[in-house]
Image (cartoon, helix red, strand yellow):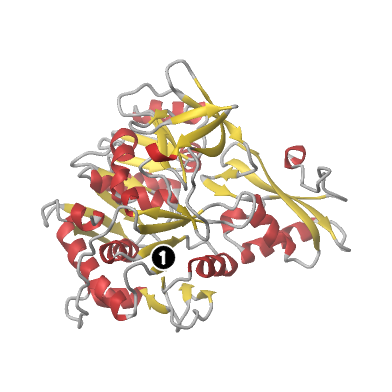
Amino acid sequence: MNAITDLLESYPASKPALVAISRDGGRRVWHFGELLARSAGLSGALAARGVDRGDAVMTLAGNRIEWVLTLLACWRMGAVALPCNTQLRRRDLELRADAVAADAGIGEEGRGPALCVGEEELLGALPEGVEAMTMADIDAVLDEDSPQERPVGVADLDPENPALIVFTSGTTGEPRGAVHAQRYLPAQRVQAEHWLGAGDGDLVWVTTATGWSKSARNVFLAPWLCGAAALIDDSRFEPGRRLEVCEREGVSVLCQAPTEYRMLAKRTKLRPLPQMRRLVSAGEPLNPEVLAKFDDALGLEISDGYGQTETGHLAGTRPGDEVRPGSMGMVLPGFETRISEGLLEVRGERCPTFFSRYLGDEPFDGDWWPTGDAVSEDEDGYLWFEGRDDDLILSAGYRIGPFEVESALLTHPAVAEAAAVGVPDEERGQLVKAVVVLRDAEPSDALAVELQEHVKRETASYKLPRVVEFAAELPKTASGKIKRAELR
């Protein structure tokens, strides 16, 4: 099998596949034939730099055509894609590069062998033998007038060959790399049809940033599996502009994080969008007043959904089903779940999108995979999220492990101990709150701001503790574990 070429070649070359909007407002429509040809050419450029079947290619790029083509080129040749979020910082990227033993790194800009975003070098000199490409290098491959390397032939892949690595949020330790097999890619058809709800002729905009599991499976794969076209936009989120782009481009299916829906409801005047026919969301429950505002203004209900990095998308409110505010819908067809002692579990062998293994670990050999999510089920099969069994923070659609925030804080010389928890917030769902024990310094508002700026330099900005409190000590169990529930 080769999921990407099987998929791309199943459509007429002239069928529109992707609308790409750049940061400067440039716009281009890409057709399936162009994507097939350009990704084939990029596979040759990667091979010329030493990338072979099974090798890992690390990307640090936003929602732009070069990112899409790189993933397609990897999957064509049997290389393994490791997309990274551009908000990650040096320590985050070094952890990922070391864990994966990347063979190539692709950054938005570049000054020599490094991964960069703009003028900021995020991953210094790459290890010996690791090749670097910049967006300019990829653009040269896309230039028909430039000399081109011979494309790599389409690899004949086994469904269990690795295709993608996505890192978790690091709930109880450092983030872990979840390896997904080739079967994961075509298996997205289930959620694409039964939750995302795309169809032939639709234009689908999944706004999630690169580097998350939902981006690799839903930004372009899920729409294509249903015959729809995808929209990617590399601009920063602005509530008013979001509606303008939807209206101008004729977006018919919109998938956003709950926070984006909240911000649109709060900061814009919602209005009917004639082409829009379906709204979906996932990551955390949406509050009823936001659901009501969209229903009143657009005449559309927002269909919630649920999934994990390790499992892929598991549940959702299906097209045509009743939307029950606060519910994440029903289990998708073909998947098997159960609720054991209040926690949702998934049968791995009945989950076609179930991950292969964590990097450095053996495959999961149990029957039921524990999601760690407390869930209830009503008499009609609708699932309701009750909370996390662990301490994962869900903020603005991001899944944030407290360990990552705490690790960043502990690198500041004034910090002796730190704990991070999620606290309720009307717009973001939760805010990251840090409780800090100082070494010798005196607590102050200025020091709180200094610690926030320090975290922003050390890790991704979405992990920023927007609330910083100081304490003489942290509450702990007899074994020394922090009592985060007490802090919340």
Which quarter of the rendered picture does the C terminus lie within?
A: top right
Image position of 261 with respect to 459: above or below: above
Q: Residue furthest front?
A: 365
The spot of residue 236 in percent (x, y) is: 44, 56
The type of residue carrying mark 1 is: Ala
Determine which residue is flagged by label 1.
Answer: 61
Quarter of the image for residue 291 reads: top left
Is 88 or 340 nearer to us in this picture?
340
Residue 233 on image: x %, y %: 35, 56
Q: Is residue 332 above or below residue 34?
A: above
Q: Which of the two residues, 89 or 20, is positioned nearer the viewer here?
A: 89
Residue 427 coordinates in the image, percent (x, y):
56, 39
The x and y percentages for residue 453 are 67, 63
Quarter of the rendering containing residue 477: top right
Horizontally, is 58 left or right of 485 in the view? left
Give whichever of 311, 68 is nearer the camera.
Answer: 311
Residue depicted at 47% across the width and 73% down the height: 116
Left or right: 483, with 239 as reference point: right
Asked if residue 382 shows in the view, the reply is yes
Q: What secondary structure is marked by label 1? A: loop
Q: Quadrant of the N terminus?
A: bottom left
User: Residue placed farthest to the top in the image?
Assistant: 379
Within-10-Å neighbours for mark 1: few <14, some 14–19, many 20+: many
Residue 235: in sight, yes or no? no
Q: Is residue 383 above or below residue 145?
A: above
The residue at the point 26 percent across, 71 percent down is 43
